[in-house]
Image: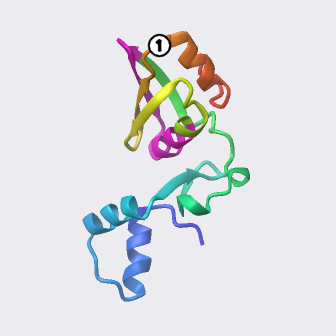
């Protein structure tokens, strides 16, 4: 079963007899390292990060990425709602030579490039797995 929203997740847990709030579920999702990954249908689903098989994850959807803008050494990437965490995870895995780290919300990612990396180098490293970023 694909669980594609916290409301759905909460409902399933309550049906199974668990007593919890939305806030508790949000904290538990972070603690258990449950992530949202894009599906081939353009939506997303929750999965344990340890069980994610790289071959099962489609490349970053061209529909997930919206734009990227730089402000000084930092970059802010806009995504479609629900895509930011999955794209940030891909950036952390695949662009670690250029990106020190990311902070993701629902539709926004803060990218922190490494000290000696130019904007062009960052964009080129991201273009390897994010279509249409250049």
| Residue 42 place in picture, x, y as percent | 61, 48
Determine the residue positioned at 73% across, 51% down: 55
| Residue 126 place in picture, x, y as percent | 59, 25
Q: Is residue 90 above or below residue 78?
A: below
Q: Is residue 125 left or right of residue 34?
A: right
Q: Is residue 130 left or right of residue 115?
A: right
Disc 1 element: loop
Q: Kindly tell me whether residue 132 is visible in this rendering.
A: no
Q: Are there few (<14), some (14-19), or many (20+) residues within 10 Å of tag 1?
A: few
Q: Nearer the viewer, residue 52 or 11?
A: 52
Instruction: Identify the residue under disc 1.
Output: 116
Is 125 magenta? The answer is no
Quarter of the rendering containing residue 64: top right
Determine the residue positioned at 51% across, 28% down: 66
Determine the residue positioned at 52% across, 37% down: 92
Determine the residue positioned at 68% across, 40% down: 59
Q: Which residues are magenta?
A: 70-90
Q: Quadrant of the C terminus?
A: top right
| Residue 85 place in picture, x, y as percent | 46, 45
Q: Nearer the viewer, residue 45 or 73?
A: 73
Quarter of the rendering containing residue 13: bottom left
Q: Kindly tell me whether residue 61 is visible in this rendering.
A: yes
Quarter of the rendering containing residue 115: top left
Q: Is residue 77 left or right of residue 132?
A: left
């Amino acid at each position: 079963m694909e669980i594609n929203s916290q409301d759905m997740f909460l409902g399933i847990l309550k049906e199974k007899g668990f007593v919890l709030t939305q806030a508790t579920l949000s904290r538990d999702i972070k603690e258990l390292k449950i992530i949202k990954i894009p599906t081939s249908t353009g939506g997303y689903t929750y999965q344990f990060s340890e069980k994610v098989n790289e071959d099962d994850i489609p490349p970053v959807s061209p529909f997930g990425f919206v734009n990227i803008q730089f402000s000084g050494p930092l970059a802010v990437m806009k995504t479609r709602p629900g895509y930011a965490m999955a794209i940030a995870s891909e950036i952390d895995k695949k662009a670690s030579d250029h990106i020190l780290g990311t902070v993701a919300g629902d539709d926004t990612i803060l990218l922190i490039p490494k000290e000696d990396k130019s904007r062009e180098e960052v964009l080129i490293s991201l273009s390897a797995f994010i279509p249409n970023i250049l």
